[in-house]
Amino acid sequence: MQNTHKPDSTTERVAVVTGAGSGIGLSVARHLAERRHPVALLDRNGDAVRDAAEKLRASGTPAVALDVDVTDRAAVDSALDKVRAELGPIRIMVTSAGIEGSAPFTDIALDDWDRILAVNLTGTFHCIQSAVPDMLDAGWGRIVTISSSSAQSGAPERAHYVASKGGVIALTKALAFELSPKGITANTIPPSIIDTPMARNGGVISEGIKLDDLAGMTPVRRLGTPDDVAAACAFLCTDDAGFITGQVIGVNGGWYL
């Protein structure tokens, strides 16, 4: 496909969002599109991202959808090559793809441990490392990872998930030190309780506590929304956020006041 879109280098930069089929990732893609960025939506749910990309294109945003498993490095590299061919060099990478798991620590199966780290941490590594050369060439880039507040506080029966998201926070800080001198910022957003399909599918947060019960326990007295996270993420991808790097930007309704 011939790329006929001519981005304004001061405002329009190609953005890649993983986990963009639903929840936080989908909202991030929409917010970046509202800021006139061409957007590539990546997700294992190909039907969901194709539908989302079609709607973005209908509103005038150049958008592509790619069915990608972020644990597969060859698939990630191939997908980003397609993004470059259709939209242009990548300047913004937001890694929202992730999975959850719950089990007492002594019952965590090795396969479950490996899978959660492969998606949440190694998948984040794959996507960022594959995109960074474009940012280095431009001397400008924005990396935003979606981690989790559970990596800050810990959580019962989620050791594998907490470890994976803690690794995302540490990776982001390491990238900030290494890449910020080259014009590339790296920040992470660790959401708390966000009302997403994945959270809803989880049902019970802990024994006797459900997702909706947490609204009254949050200082702002409501659950977070994907748009809450996406608004912060979109700001971190702007020129105005150029002096913000290596930061853990809590979008958590005041859980850690």
Image (cartoon, helix red, strand yellow):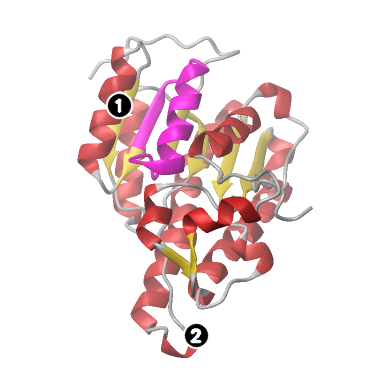
The residue under label 1 is 53
**Amino acid bearing label 2:** Phe
Can you say whether 35 is above or below 110 in the image? above
For image coordinates 25% across by 46% down, the residue present is: 45
Crowding near the residue tagged with mark 2, few <14, some 14–19, many ≥20 C-alpha atoms within 10 Å: few
Please, is residue 98 above or below residue 16 in the view?
Answer: below
Q: Crowding near pointer 1: few (<14 within 10 Å), some, many (20+)? A: many
**21 to 101, vertically: above or below:** above
The residue beneath circle 2 is 105
Compared across the picture, whether 88 is left or right of 214 comes to: left
What are the residue bounds of the magenta stretch? Answer: 18-41
Left or right, 51 with respect to 73, comes to left
Q: Nearer the viewer, residue 128 or 157?
A: 157
Tell me which residue sits at (64%, 56%) in the image.
Answer: 217
Tell us which disc is closer to us: 2 or 1. Answer: 2
Quick one: 39 or 176, which is closer to the camera? 39
Q: Where is residue 73? Give x, y as percent.
A: 35, 55
Amino acid on which disc 1 is placed: Ala
Cβ atoms at labels 2 and 1 below 8 Å apart: no
Marked residue nearer the N-terminal end (2 or 1): 1
